[in-house]
Image: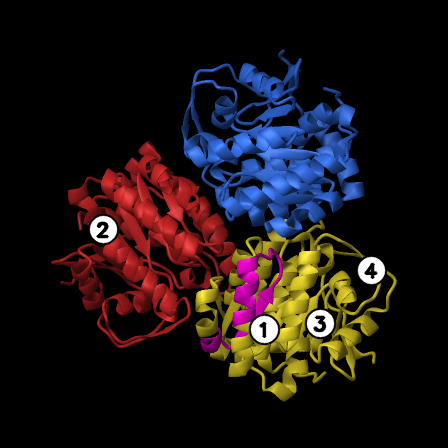
Chain colours: A blue, B yellow, C red
Amino acid sequence: MNPKIIFLDAVREHNPLIHNITNLVSAHFTANGLLALGASPMMAESPDEMAELATISSAVVLNLGTPSDEKVSAMLAAGMAANQAGVPVVLDPVAVGASHLRQKTVATLTQNIQFAAIRGNAGELAYLADVQWASKGVDAGQGSGNLAEIAQKVAQKFNTIAVLSGEHDFVANHDRVMKLSNGVALFPKVTATGCLLSAIVGAFLAVAPRELAFQAACEACTVYAIAGELAAVGLQATQSGTFAVRLLDALAAIDATQTEQLMKAEWII
Amino acid sequence: MNPKIIFLDAVREHNPLIHNITNLVSAHFTANGLLALGASPMMAESPDEMAELATISSAVVLNLGTPSDEKVSAMLAAGMAANQAGVPVVLDPVAVGASHLRQKTVATLTQNIQFAAIRGNAGELAYLADVQWASKGVDAGQGSGNLAEIAQKVAQKFNTIAVLSGEHDFVANHDRVMKLSNGVALFPKVTATGCLLSAIVGAFLAVAPRELAFQAACEACTVYAIAGELAAVGLQATQSGTFAVRLLDALAAIDATQTEQLMKAEWII
Amino acid sequence: MNPKIIFLDAVREHNPLIHNITNLVSAHFTANGLLALGASPMMAESPDEMAELATISSAVVLNLGTPSDEKVSAMLAAGMAANQAGVPVVLDPVAVGASHLRQKTVATLTQNIQFAAIRGNAGELAYLADVQWASKGVDAGQGSGNLAEIAQKVAQKFNTIAVLSGEHDFVANHDRVMKLSNGVALFPKVTATGCLLSAIVGAFLAVAPRELAFQAACEACTVYAIAGELAAVGLQATQSGTFAVRLLDALAAIDATQTEQLMKAEWII
């Protein structure tokens, strides 16, 4: 990874419009997180306006949190229109292993849409990579697979950038995997922090040329994780409520220089 | 505008039930804002209970944030029942210019419902006034129109009170326009602050006699903007997370005397 | 009530997966509250995945906040599957008296699902007990009925544990009623605090043997109310925004010993 963070300032300069088809748990938090970062959030869900909104957006983020027939139609319409318009599309396969509906939905989406990135936790990406894993609802759960290999397998299978987030984040493309080691234990105690990361990956992809998409995805994860570190300063492990508030403050306050100084990144494949 | 704030105490005394047909981004924040102010929020969306709920409510607020066929049916049923029962109805035409679905929906709503007030940002009201404007998703965007004239045009076209909110708020009826200059730059960094203002306009209209509706709308904007000023004391421009929390605290703490001392209002048409 | 709090540690040890079919107002806050407490929240709403998700869950919570045809189908599917699998189901009959749709929905649900607990405010449980009461939208409203008797009547009629929450909480089974007197006035100033209590009752039932379900429900109410007391320390009555944030912190920080020392419980029937 380039040790210079180049796309955070670009997000703030261009305020990319990020169109999210998301769920009732994460919509408010995701919108506030994107605003704090410097992007412009839009949430909609009617299939009737998807193609139109996708083409005025700088990125489209499809979140599987609460799937329904209508939302799947909306996601298909938005993703396919975005593909045609050259707008990057991010998939967040929330709890994909938890039900046949989710499995079928993700199969439909990945067959019809080319994703610029797929962001999920270990359990979600293990499912996509056909690796055994004991997920638990929307949580990552436990498994013994090699996380870097899981991420790489997803990247290869779907010809995309795979972002496996957790205690460490693994960002993979077809050939290489970057391990990112910033972050704090409070993240998984706040709901929708994964959804927000997917949206932030979308915001970084929105301002990056396609050939630097991998770098942009790594920057998104690193900026987000370090914002969490800054937000957690002085907090106890129990203060998830306060952490969520401060995380929004930190997403607006963090700058490129700070990120470069604190980032922990290494190529592992 | 009457320099006395008379309807804030009335909201707290009568706790008007405000029925919101709203979106998944703003529902939680709007409900908490109404509660903090002293009103009683209700959010529902099934067409099957709309007429019933509208008639037990003191105001109905229709928010276009995430339109769908079912929501539009619900909005029509609620708005028409409220009109019949003499309950004031507020329209928030979120991102109306962004898609044909939204444009068609607003046309249907304005043709069938008499709105007591329409509250939107510059881009949204410019669309309603047939004025050229470059909106950006749900954000106001940029344009060169005269904001007071846009507000007045909306008021005249829809025979309503138009509330154009932004750095300055413009409240217009058929004949006159009040410019309100309280507020802080943190407002647009928090999602759904516009939606909450629409709901608060509803709460003030709910306790005002019809002939004082203009005064009530001005008070709603002023109380809200000054609550924001109080919430922002000591905060940096990046602290949108903390600001949102304190805004709720301030909506409960603000009183009429304080508002009268800090308000900046002038007739400009 | 057993003066020992035994199920709080069990929630934290087992992190039970709590499946909520809930509404757009409360979803985010409920998920964060369950996470803070130590449970694992899941929110979904498609009828197509309900049976599957219900059987992998440790409790199912059905919340009537924003009913729709599809949600009612989902609730029926989830509740019936949970009944078959022996997974406890909690009903939160939000604003049941406010519309015929809600009344019909609750009738359908109670006829087809055996609830382990029903949690509501005085107005909601008075409706279920066929007692006259003047509810106001989603708020409890005013009435002169005896709250302990209302709770007991609901427990008897639906063969369940009834939890009537308010300034005092009343937990009833067929024979007895416990009055719990912890809590703070800030609770009703934050939206969805009732919904979160219903979910927390679900989390406690999830880790308790069936014969100790009454004890578990009492513990849930007491832990939640005392977390509120701790969150409110040093706050003014107007600080509902700050209270909501600190309540999440307190739900993670509170322990059994603290709860035992502060609890105020007495048998009244």
> Disc 1 versus disc 4: distance between alpha carbons?
27 Å
Mark 1 or 4 closer to N-term? 4
> In the image, which disc is placed on residue C114?
2
- Binning the other alpha carbons within 10 Å of mark 4 as few (below 14), some (14 to 19) or many (20 upward) gives some
Give whichever of B150, A182 is nearer the camera.
B150
* Quarter of the view holding residue A9: top right
Under mark 4, the amino acid is Trp
> Disc 2 versus disc 3: distance between alpha carbons?
50 Å
Under mark 1, the amino acid is Gly
- Start and end of the magenta stretch? B54-77
Q: Are marks 2 and 1 on the same chain?
A: no
> Disc 3 versus disc 4: distance between alpha carbons?
17 Å
- The residue at which mark 3 appears reads as B163
Tell me: B52 left or right of B215: left
- The residue at which mark 1 appears reads as B202
- The residue at which mark 4 appears reads as B133
Label 1 resides on the chain identified as: B
